[in-house]
Amino acid sequence: MDGVEEAGPVHWSTRPGETFVAAAVAVVLGAGVLLVDTPGRVLLGAATLLLVAVVVRDLVLRPRLLADEAQVVVATLGGRTVIPRERLRARVRTGRRLGMRSTTLELEDTGDDAVLLVLGRRDLGTDPEQVGAQLLGHRPV
């Protein structure tokens, strides 16, 4: 061997702990539906359904982002989007909304104007800046 390791595919997903907490809260809220009045049932029922949808989304979209030397694959509710590396444009954007700072990773297919994917910290399970640096072959400073 020449001492050079070949990089295998890397992937990012929502942290399992976050999914577990959302599922646990959904169970608690679902049980709470039995203990409250009618308006409370509607509100708790809606919150429970929303959290169940988040948990299902987290489980179905695993891994959320998969990258190897040839391509990047992003899991979406519409299926998997594959972007060849030579057509990949990755950008990290930081902005403020409602007084909070958020950082997102934008993945664009330069060969298809319809493909722009935006992933945040929850989608990736880590800092989008680090993922962007790794996708572009750079180590974060």
Image (tube, rainbow, N blue to C red):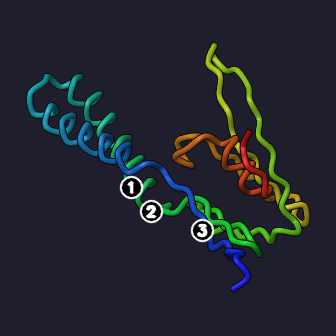
Badge 1 vs badge 2, beta-carbon distance below 8 Å: yes
How far from the left and from the top, in percent, is residue 21?
Answer: 30, 40
Q: Amino acid at mark 2?
A: Val
Residues packed near mark 3 inside 10 Å, few (<14), some (14 to 19) or many (20 plus): few
> Which residue is depicted at the point 29% across and 39% down?
48
Q: Give residue 11's quadrant in the image.
A: bottom right
Q: Is residue 99 above or below residue 38?
A: above
C-alpha gap between disc 3 and disc 1:
15 Å
Q: Amino acid at mark 1?
A: Val
**First in residue order: circle 3 vs circle 2:** 2
Q: Give residue 101's quadrant in the image.
A: top right
Q: Nearer the viewer, residue 116 or 12?
A: 12
Q: SS at mark 2? A: helix
C-alpha gap between disc 3 and disc 2:
10 Å
Query: Which residue position holds label 1?
Result: 56
C-alpha gap between disc 1 and disc 2:
6 Å
How far from the left and from the top, in percent, is residue 82?
Answer: 72, 70
> Which residue is depicted at the point 65% across and 28% down?
102
Q: SS at mark 3? A: strand
Query: Which residue position holds label 3?
Result: 79
Q: Amino acid at mark 3?
A: Gly
Q: Give residue 115's quadrant in the image.
A: bottom right
Q: How many badges with numbers are in the image? A: 3
> Which residue is depicted at the point 77% across and 68% down?
83
